[in-house]
Amino acid sequence: MNPSDSPLVTEEVDTLASIIMVMQRCFMTNLMGKLSKGSLSFPQFFLLGHLCSHGPTGMRRIAELMGHSTPAATGLVKRLEKLGYVKRSHAELDRRKVTVTPTPKAARLVEEVREEFVGNLEKVLGKLTPQEQHSWLDIYKKVRDHCTACPDSQGTAHS
C-alpha cells in the first residue's frame, strides 16, 4: 500500500497541519524575537547557521543555498557584514572571488538560539516514552528527507 493511501493521510491531514503550525509558533516565537532585536530576517539567520556549521563559504554557494541570484546574495551578505555578523574576503589572485566567514558575534547568536531550541525539544521528548522518542526521530528524518528533496527548496531559505 502506498503511504499516501493510508487513512491518516486522507482523514487527519488538517489536524496534522494545525499541530505543525502550533509547533512552529511555539519553537519560533523566541527565535523571531531574538532576530528582530538584531535586525535579522529568518533567511539571514539561516545563512548564519550554515556559515557557523560549514565555515567560510563562497558567494556562488551562498546564492545557491539561499535560492537567490549572486547580486541578491551579495546584498544579503552586505547587510550581515554591516551588522557585524560576517566578514568578506577577496581571493588574492582573483578579487572577484569572495569568501564569507561568520564572526564570533554570529557564532554566539547561532549557539544561543540552538541551545534554546534544543532545550525546548528536550522538554517535548521528556513527555514521550523511549519508543515514542525513536519513532518521532524516525518520522522527522523522513520529513527532512522529503523537504530537502523538494524541487523548490533543496534545503534553501527564501526571503
Image (cartoon, rainbow, N blue to C red):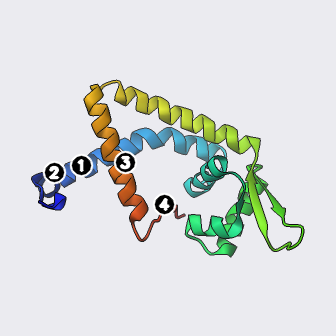
Which label's residue is closer to the chain start, 4 or 3? Answer: 3
Q: Nearer the viewer, mark 3 or mark 1?
A: 3
Q: How many marks?
A: 4
C-alpha span from label 1 to label 4 = 22 Å
Residue where numbered disc 1 is placed: 16
Badge 1: residue crowd in 10 Å (few <14, some 14–19, many ≥20):
few
Depicted 123 relative to depicted 158: above or below: above
Of helix, strand and loop, which one carries label 2? Answer: helix
C-alpha span from label 1 to label 2 = 6 Å
Which label's residue is closer to the chain start, 1 or 4? Answer: 1
- The image quarter containing residue 38 is top right
Q: Residue at x 61, y 52 (%)?
A: 50
Name the foreground residue: 126 vs 133: 133
Q: Amino acid at mark 2?
A: Glu
Q: Are marks 3 and 1 in contact (CB under 8 Å)?
A: no
Which label's residue is closer to the chain start, 2 or 4? Answer: 2
Q: Nearer the viewer, mark 4 or mark 3?
A: 3
Of helix, strand and loop, which one carries label 4? Answer: loop
- The image quarter containing residue 107 is top right
Q: Are marks 1 and 2 in contact (CB under 8 Å)?
A: yes
Tell whether 12 sits left or right of 20.
left
Tell whether 49 sits left or right of 132.
right
C-alpha span from label 2 to label 4 = 27 Å
